[in-house]
Amino acid sequence: MPHPSKVRVLPIVALACVFTLKVTTFHGQTSAPAPTSPPASTPAPAATESPSTSTDLFVMAGSDIDRPGSLPRANYNIGIGHTFGFLKKDPIGDELTFAYTYENAGTHGFLHTQYGEHSEQFGVMKNFAIHGTQAVSGYTWIQTGITTYTGYSRLMNHLDTGLSLGAIVHLSFHNSIWIQESYSKVVSQPWYTTSSIGYTCSW
């Protein structure tokens, strides 16, 4: 005959086994964790494009060669340009610019006279690589705007256009030297050329 204490223990053990079986079973499937599959491989990040600048702040100084003749005159230029992605395939350019230029319009002197030529111009610039080097690249620049002559009895405003060809000497990613040759024409005035050199900060 079994011991009374053992008789009381058997139903408790049986109930515990049934409870454990119920807990570990859900809709006919055990709740034991399914074998974990290895995590899906993370796609390799796309190759990052080489960095490119989007904004240029430039300051240039040079000398005009007025026509007719070959009289040198001071020329100072400051401006800003920004590259727009939607213009990347535009054959004329992808960088829109705004610049202000002061030129000595006097008949004598070089740096400054009472007669000034002030131009505000919008433009479009196209940068291009030069084969065989990364330290130097080139650009074309088309500009148009208004030139105002000062120092006379009244202000005189004229439409102007300019075409430039230049080279960029890259000192670093953010700093460069621009060397530029320009052909300019102000309506009702003789055409002239300008040779300039300047510093540009890019970011």
Image: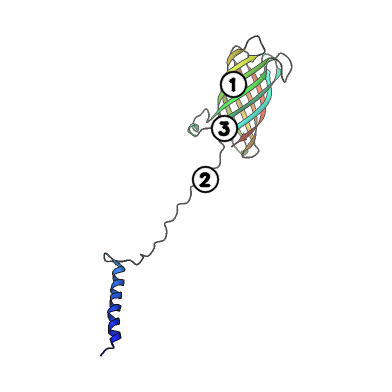
Q: Closer to the camera: disc 2 or disc 1?
A: 1
Answer above or below: position of 198 versus 186: below
Q: Earlier in the sequence, mark 1 or mark 3?
A: 1
Quadrant where the N terminus is found in the figure:
bottom left
Secondary structure type for disc 2: loop
Q: Amino acid at mark 1?
A: Glu
Q: Residue at x 30, y 75 (%)?
A: 16
Q: Earlier in the sequence, mark 2 or mark 1?
A: 2
Pinpoint residue 159: horizontal percent, then vertical percent: 57, 16
Secondary structure type for disc 3: strand
Q: Which mark is residue 48?
A: 2
Q: Which mark is residue 120?
A: 1
Q: Residue at x 56, y 24 (%)?
A: 122
Quadrant where the C terminus is found in the figure:
top right
Q: Determine crowd level at label 1: few under 14, some 14-19, many 20+ residues with C-alpha closer than 10 A.
A: some
Secondary structure type for disc 1: strand
Residue 64 horizontal side relative to residue 43, left or right: right
Real-space Cα distance between discs 3 and 2? 21 Å
Cβ atoms at labels 3 and 2 below 8 Å apart: no
Q: Which residue is mark 3?
A: 127
Pinpoint residue 167: horizontal percent, then vertical percent: 63, 31
Q: Determine crowd level at label 2: few under 14, some 14-19, many 20+ residues with C-alpha closer than 10 A.
A: few
